[in-house]
Amino acid sequence: NAGVTQTPKFRILKIGQSMTLQCTQDMNHNYMYWYRQDPGMGLKLIYYSVGAGITDKGEVPNGYNVSRSTTEDFPLRLELAAPSQTSVYFCASSYKGEPAYEQYFGPGTRLTVT
Amino acid sequence: GQNIDQPTEMTATEGAIVQINCTYQTSGFNGLFWYQQHAGEAPTFLSYNVLDGLEEKGRFSSFLSRSKGYSYLLLKELQMKDSASYLCAVSDSNYQLIWGAGTKLIIKP
């Protein structure tokens, strides 16, 4: 089991560029999440999905889009990157039925927008 | 609004005991998690409490009082590898995790 994998590990974008952060899990988890973590701050939920074909906004969705065409994959799309999107992005997954849905995290993507 | 408070930073000595507190105000409660996050790495699960009381797991214990909106994480026999940030998170009425900013724990020899 690889768990939750994310690519790329690091990326530098210019203002206005777009990119997709990839996330894949092989644990057959139905719930998947995207968070961002700014220095000294807690994790902020961007988007989440409760299963293939179903996505919903979290606390900070502006500037991002997601899709969930399969159980395994949950890519995060950044359109028109802005310096405020400089952050570390974590993808996580959980299985409904475990105690209040313990979340398993990927290693993160460090994104810098200049 | 929803709020999780924990100290920003704590310092302790190798071999000692440290208690990291967390207070919360959330819309609904479906349990409280503690995660450990080493610098530059992803958070990893430490403990889960949904009922009042103490849960012990090796050198780590976690306590919950739902009536007080309070939890603590107790680390015993501190080791240098325990230097990390400790994140408190509450599962709200929609089973979404609300996260505290984390407590950076510095262990000194």
Image (tube, helix red, strand yellow):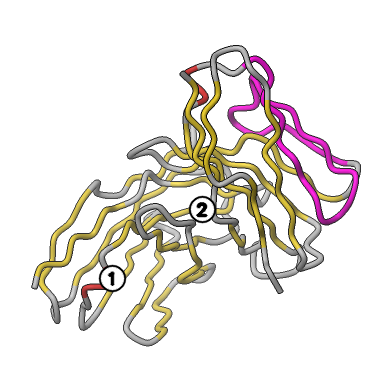
Q: State the residue at coordinates (57%, 49%).
A: B97
**B75, above or below B12, in the image:** below
Chain letter of the residue beneath label 2 in the structure image: B
Q: Left of A8 or right of it: where is B99?
A: left
**Observer-nearest residue: A47 or B81?**
B81
Q: Is A71 covered by the magenta stretch?
A: yes
Q: Position of residue A74 (x, y in %)?
A: 77, 45
Mark 2 Cα shell of 10 Å, populated few (<14), some (14-19), many (≥20):
many
Three-letter residue code for mark 1: Asp
Q: Is residue B82 left or right of residue B46?
A: left
Mark 2 lies on a secondary structure that is strand
Single out the mark in the foreground, 2 or 1: 1
> Magenta residues?
A54-80
User: Residue at 51% across / 69% down in the picture?
Assistant: B48
Horizontal and vertical percent position of residue A114: 46, 18
Q: Residue furthest bottom?
A: B58
Q: Nearer the viewer, residue B51 or B55?
A: B55
With respect to residue B74, does A46 lie above or below? above
Q: Main secondary structure of the magenta part?
A: loop
Q: Amino acid at mark 2?
A: Val
Could you say where residue B42 lies in the image, as x and y percent from the top left? 49, 56
Question: Residue B82's mark?
Answer: 1
Give the residue drawn at x 24%, y 80%.
B76
Position in image of residue B16 (x %, y %): 13, 78
**Residue depicted at 21% across the width and 73% down the height:** B80
> Which badge, 2 or 1, comes first in the chain's sequence?
1
Please identify the quarter of the rendering in which residue B64 is found: bottom left
Closer to the camera in the image, B77 or B55? B77
Residue of label 2: B90
- Position of residue A104 relative to residue A56, above or below, is below
* The N terminus of chain A, quarter of image: bottom right
